């Protein structure tokens, strides 16, 4: 029986890999800002792509390079300042390609001892950075949302009967609320934050009073909207008194633990029960990576280990470290390897310097914005997020401002809200973002057309 031409050395023409490598090299050298288009323009560009006989590699590749890739905003562009950017290192990009080619079955030690050991080495580095005990551990997952879901599942199952109420701030990430909904954690105390956006132990204690049903507290190690690090030490004190599980969503801001000048913001992180950090955010890994750590990973193993006739072989007499035992994900890519490889190639200090650039850019932008007539800061930036007001502007003006910057190829920005008020928001993470871009953005605030 003759196999179809999907695999093997003749599946694609000779020299094809060099062309793809050339495209990747160009992307690494300078990621374009890109654009977005209406469906009425986009879909016709893809007409006739999927056919019975195929287009052949040349025509198919042209559809990608001419239609698919250009009609997207470059999260990896140094001018992407919206949401949370992604600025993967060159080493991380190439390791991501290698991981895809190798197809590691990274859910178990039995199938992928090498990749899992390398990922665990990276997790240990992160745990040491946080001051977690020697026994701490976990796994890499596909993103912060599934990391939060997995951690909160373990937290829920540790709660005694009648103690499944969750306390979190009004600034908690949407995935936290979504996870609580999916897990049936319907009793939630949402603690309002003040003008600084910080969830504190004092505020938590005041909100819950003498309640004894609080079993889980969720904090932020750098809130996604404003980049605020909560009062982790104060919250840990309250959790200790209550016997509650403390989970920290540090998906965005956890990378700032690398900076000695920002380390004090995270005092108390060493006392958490679980925490997530997304390497694809501020640790310069490609998309699709979340480091999930538990103080006591055996609690997670008891919750997440899957059983079945064909997978029980993964669990032998000798305790093996299976990433699938620590989060809600069986089949998985080795998403920790790009960070591991970049650390191996460049070292920790290069990552420290790269994270510091984002903080310095945010500080510089905040100073220039504060000095601009009609513009004021919502708060001084803690990390790389800058939020600001423009006198007389509402949602319509902010949208027009963002549309104009993208149309002119200056930057991709997205306004946000703070306590219900429409505000401007910039996120600095890419180490190659030019300081001149700050001047361009400040100048753009003088007029909206």
Image (spheres, rainbow, N blue to C red):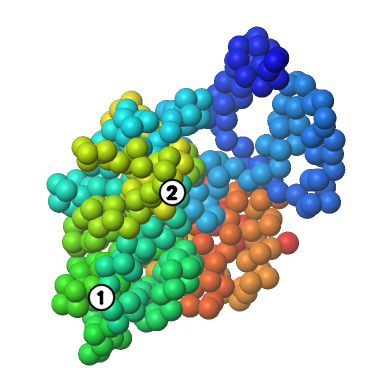
Residue nearest the observer in this picture, 96 or 393: 96
Residue drawn 41% across the image and 47% down it: 308
Residue nearest the observer in this picture, 100 or 324: 324
Tell me if mark 1 has few (under 14), some (14-19) or many (20+) residues whose alpha carbon lies within 10 angstroms of its own: few
Task: Residue at the far top: name it.
Answer: 14
Left or right for 45, reference 120: right
Viewport quadrant of the N terminus: top right
Tell me if residue 105 comes above or below residue 271 in the rendering: above
Q: Give the secondary structure at mark 2.
A: loop
Viewport quadrant of the C terminus: bottom right
User: What residue is disc 1 on?
Assistant: 160
Left or right for 14, reference 91: right
User: What residue is disc 2 on?
Assistant: 329
Residue drawn 32% across the image and 62% down it: 154
Residue drawn 65% across the image and 61% down it: 401
Query: Does the rendering let one see residue 200?
Result: no
Tell me if mark 2 has few (under 14), some (14-19) or many (20+) residues whose alpha carbon lies within 10 angstroms of its own: some
Name the image quarter holding residue 199. bottom left
Disc with the residue nearer the chain's start (2 vs 1): 1
Gap in angstroms between the C-alphas marked 2 and 1: 26 Å
Give coordinates of residue 447: x percent, y percent: 66, 63
Give coordinates of residue 251: x percent, y percent: 39, 54
Residue drawn 36% across the image and 64% down it: 152
């Amino acid at each position: 029986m003759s196999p179809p031409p999907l695999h093997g050395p003749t599946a694609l023409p000779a020299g094809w890999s060099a062309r793809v490598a050339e495209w990747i090299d160009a992307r690494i050298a300078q990621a374009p800002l890109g654009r977005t288009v209406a469906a009425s323009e986009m879909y016709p560009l893809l007409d006739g792509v999927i056919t019975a006989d195929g287009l052949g590699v040349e025509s198919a590749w042209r559809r990608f390079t001419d239609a698919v890739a250009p009609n997207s905003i470059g999260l990896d562009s140094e001018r992407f300042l919206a949401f949370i950017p992604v600025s993967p290192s060159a080493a991380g990009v190439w390791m991501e390609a290698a991981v895809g080619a190798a197809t590691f079955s990274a859910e178990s030690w039995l199938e992928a001892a090498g990749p899992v050991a390398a990922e665990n080495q990276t997790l240990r580095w992160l745990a040491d950075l946080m001051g977690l005990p020697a026994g701490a551990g976990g796994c890499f997952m596909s993103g912060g949302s599934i990391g939060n879901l997995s951690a909160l599942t373990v937290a829920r199952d540790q709660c005694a009967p009648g103690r499944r109420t969750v306390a979190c701030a009004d600034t908690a990430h949407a995935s936290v609320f979504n996870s609580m909904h999916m897990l049936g954690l319907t009793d939630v105390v949402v603690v309002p934050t003040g003008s600084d956006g910080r969830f504190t132990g004092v505020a938590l204690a005041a909100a819950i009073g003498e309640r004894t049903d609080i079993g889980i507290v969720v904090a932020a190690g750098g809130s996604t909207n404003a980049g605020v690090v909560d009062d982790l030490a104060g919250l840990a004190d309250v959790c200790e008194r209550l016997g509650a599980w403390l989970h920290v969503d540090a998906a965005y801001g956890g990378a700032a633990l690398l900076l000695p000048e920002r380390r004090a913001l995270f005092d108390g992180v060493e006392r958490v029960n679980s925490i997530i950090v997304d390497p694809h955010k501020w640790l310069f890994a490609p998309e699709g990576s979340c480091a999930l750590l538990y103080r006591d990973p055996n609690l997670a193993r008891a919750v997440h280990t899957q059983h079945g006739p064909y997978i029980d072989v993964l669990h032998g007499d000798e305790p093996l470290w299976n990433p699938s035992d620590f989060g809600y994900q069986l089949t998985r890519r080795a998403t920790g390897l790009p960070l591991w490889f970049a650390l191996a190639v460049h070292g920790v200090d290069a990552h420290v310097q790269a994270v510091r650039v984002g903080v310095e850019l945010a500080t510089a932008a905040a100073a220039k914005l504060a000095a601009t007539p009609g513009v004021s800061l919502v708060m001084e930036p803690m990390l790389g997020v800058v939020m600001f007001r423009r006198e007389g502007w509402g949602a319509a003006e902010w949208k027009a401002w963002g549309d104009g910057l993208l149309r002119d190829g200056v930057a991709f920005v997205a306004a946000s809200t703070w306590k219900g008020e429409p505000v401007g928001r910039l996120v600095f993470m890419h180490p190659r973002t030019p300081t001149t871009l700050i001047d361009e953005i400040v100048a753009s605030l003088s007029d909206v057309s």
